[in-house]
């Protein structure tokens, strides 16, 4: 069959991610507004997001390694998605600062808990010849949720402006659907376990995989992490879109447009990666990133912003899922969750540094220098990955 690689587990994992992203992205555009409405300062919002992302980053590596050593995937996936679902209505119950910190951190912990195990399950459903397709299809469904979620939020707030708490309860519904879909996933029996020691009390033990893993892993992930250090939050692109003349509705609209392009392109680019090679597609994506950032650095008209966000969607489709598929092809099956978890953990930490660096460059030298620096690094990493032996 033509789409035989889209197995039951691939469909269920993809639907789980779609429902979860609908829930999460319903809240993403309104989270800063909600936090300000209950008394959070800009400093407190920054601290909240920083702690939450740090927890998500470190837990991806920790739970990925635990998954490999326990020879289990499904419990990590189920509990991880359940935590994220439960955390959303928690935000609507109380306004205490520490309660909000707990709920937001719990949501990010759920993401960290499930990421490595989920990607390992996806890898188990594919062959080296279909990894790009499988990861691309999953990413396409996941990102489709990032389109549906903000649209639903905008529609609700249009009719009920300022009613943020009800929106958190509404977001609980797709979260429940995601948890229900995890019950339909079937895990294959695994007997292989990594030979390296594991302690549940050593939260940074996953970092040892950097020296334990294959040399090809270090060469590939090393390049990707250098890029991650200069790949700042999309908030900066949205701020530049605002500077270029888009109003608030236009800024939200262009973000939805980017996610729609990303969702539509992820599966086809995964097919291209399987057919023509992960390296070519990923390197092409990095060059597109450079074009987008050079363009956005000097964008002053709405149509330029629109073109850049279209290309940015293609870039995302050509890199995010393709990178994971490539990593899964050069890592041992018994260490798959550790390999992906370690990469995504370091990537999350690098992303925090990237946003700080971009903010500093923007403040000191302007948007052109900030975006131009990121573009130049992306081109350099692209050239490196085009030639490195893996």
Image: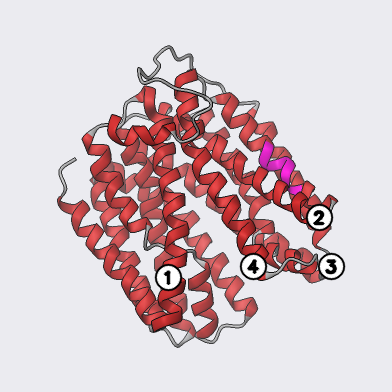
Q: As displayed, is residue 42 above or below residue 352?
A: below
Residue at 35%, 65% (x, y): give it.
289
Whole-percent x and y of residue 4?
43, 30
**Alpha carbon distance from label 3 to label 4:** 28 Å
Q: Is residue 35 above or below residue 185?
A: below
Point out the tag, 1 or 4, that comes first from the N-terminus. Answer: 4
**x and y percent of residue 316 in the render?**
41, 57
Circle 1 or circle 4, nearest the eye = 4
Give SS at disc 2: loop
Q: Which residues are magenta?
A: 83-88
Q: Earlier in the sequence, mark 4 or mark 2?
A: 4
Question: Badge 2: few (under 14), some or many (20 or more) residues near its Cα, within 10 Å?
Answer: few
Cα–Cα span, label 4 and label 2: 16 Å
Q: Secondary structure at mark 3?
A: loop
Asked whether 318 or 96 is in front, the reply is: 96
Apparent side of residue 6 relative to residue 47 in the rendered image (left or right):
left
At horizontal 71% and vertical 66% (from top left) the residue drawn is 154
Name the mark on residue 388.
none
Q: Is residue 341 magenta?
A: no
In space, the residues marked 3 and 2 are separated at their CA atoms by: 24 Å
User: Quick one: SS at disc 1?
Assistant: helix
Instruction: Tell which circle, 3 or 2, labels the residue nearer the N-terminal end.
Output: 2
The residue wearing badge 3 is 160
Say if mark 1 contacts mark 2, CB within 8 Å. no
Marks 3 and 4 in Cβ contact (< 8 Å): no
Q: Earlier in the sequence, mark 3 or mark 4?
A: 4
Residue 43 — which label?
A: 4
């Amino acid at each position: 069959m033509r789409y035989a690689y889209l197995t039951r587990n691939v469909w269920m994992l993809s639907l789980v991610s779609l429902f979860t992203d609908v829930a999460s992205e319903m809240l993403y555009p309104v989270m800063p507004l909600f936090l300000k409405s209950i008394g959070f300062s800009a400093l407190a919002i920054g601290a909240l997001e920083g702690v939450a992302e740090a927890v998500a980053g470190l837990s991806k590596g920790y739970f990925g390694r635990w998954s490999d050593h326990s020879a289990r995937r499904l419990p990590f996936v189920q509990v991880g998605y359940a935590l994220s679902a439960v955390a959303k209505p928690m935000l609507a119950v109380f306004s205490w600062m520490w309660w909000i910190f707990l709920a937001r951190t719990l949501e990010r912990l759920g993401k960290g808990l499930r990421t490595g195990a989920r990607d390992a399950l996806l890898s188990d459903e594919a062959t080296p010849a279909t990894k790009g397709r499988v990861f691309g299809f999953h990413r396409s469904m996941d990102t489709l949720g990032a389109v549906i979620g903000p649209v639903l939020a905008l529609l609700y707030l249009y009719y009920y402006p300022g009613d943020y708490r009800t929106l958190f309860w509404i977001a609980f519904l797709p979260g429940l659907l995601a948890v229900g879909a995890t019950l339909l996933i079937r895990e294959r029996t695994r007997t292989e376990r990594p030979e390296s020691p594991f302690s549940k009390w050593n939260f940074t033990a996953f970092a040892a995989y950097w020296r334990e893993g294959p040399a090809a892993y270090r060469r590939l992930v090393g390049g990707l992490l250098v890029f991650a250090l200069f790949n700042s939050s999309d908030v900066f692109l949205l701020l530049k879109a605002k500077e270029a003349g888009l109003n608030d509705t236009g800024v939200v609209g262009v973000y939805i447009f980017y996610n729609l392009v990303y969702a539509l392109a992820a599966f086809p680019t995964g097919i291209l990666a399987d057919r023509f090679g992960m390296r070519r597609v990923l390197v092409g994506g990095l060059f597109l990133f450079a074009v987008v950032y050079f363009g956005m650095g000097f964008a002053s008209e709405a149509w330029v912003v629109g073109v850049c966000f279209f290309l940015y969607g293609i870039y995302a489709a050509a890199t995010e899922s393709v990178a994971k598929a490539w990593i899964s092809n050069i890592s041992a099956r018994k260490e798959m969750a550790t390999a992906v978890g370690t990469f995504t953990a370091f990537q999350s930490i690098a992303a925090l540094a990237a946003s700080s660096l971009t903010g500093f460059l923007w403040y000191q030298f302007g948007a052109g220098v900030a975006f131009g620096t990121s573009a130049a690094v992306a081109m350099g990493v692209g050239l490196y990955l085009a030639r490195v032996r893996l």
